[in-house]
Image (tube, rainbow, N blue to C red):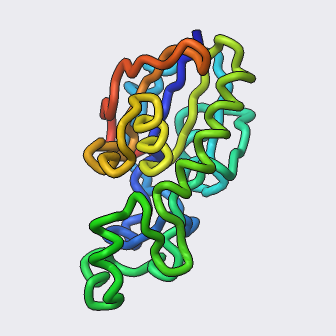
Amino acid sequence: MTRWFLIRHAPIEQAWSGRIVGRTDVGIESGADGTQLLRSLPPRATWVVSSLRRTSQTAAALGGRDWQVVPALAEQDHGDWEGERWSDLLAIDPRAPEYLATYDRTRPPGGESLEDVRDRCIPAFTAISRQANASDVVAVLHAGPIRCILATVLDMPLSSALKLSVAPLSLTLLEGSCDQGWQVVTVNQVFARKLG
């Protein structure tokens, strides 16, 4: 049995709060204690991060070492909307209402749909699971890929994925295998909001 410890990265730099930062490479805020989360992680595991620095910064703050960088597990690319404020989106782009109503299958201009994210994340999740060979994996990722993984293992429509809360520094734990299936042990268990 393989266990996946899916951790959403720490909160992003305050200057980016409220902005669309899917594939924008921003850092994390510092300040709080990740000790409780760290205690929940296995002492020996394969560590995985995306190609965006907020995941490697969080992994380092949690004591991770020698992690594997997996670009396929990066956050959704919001294309032309990256850096804009969510609250301004409707005024900026008349296509925003369609996207917000069908985000799972509609691409923002120059970006990815959630289906696109799933289509690149799940093969990586499967390959890492098979390589793990019944050992533990700690993956510091983003809300989008975590939701895609959860929707897939739960056979849930991707259109319902935003109903899954994935807070910064939360832990989602899966147990199982690609051949035998996965059990969701916990979702969005929050220990701290920041790391320092």
Image quadrant containing the N terminus: top right
Q: Quadrant of residue 51?
A: bottom right
Percent across and percent down for residue 185 are 37, 18
Q: Quadrant of residue 122?
A: top right
In the image, residue 25 sits, relative to residue 115, either above or below, namely below
Percent across and percent down for residue 132 are 70, 20
Rendered residue at 33%/64% (across/down): 102
Camera-side residue: 15 or 125?
125
Camera-side residue: 5 or 98?
98
Rendered residue at 42%/48% (across/down): 143
Camera-side residue: 101 or 34?
101
Percent across and percent down for residue 28 are 48, 56
Instruction: Tell me if 179 is positioned left or right of 130 in this view.
Output: left
- Res. 56 in view: no
Rendered residue at 53%/66% (across/down): 112
- Res. 108 in view: yes
Rendered residue at 39%/53% (across/down): 11
Image quadrant containing the C terminus: top left
Q: Quadrant of residue 188?
A: top left
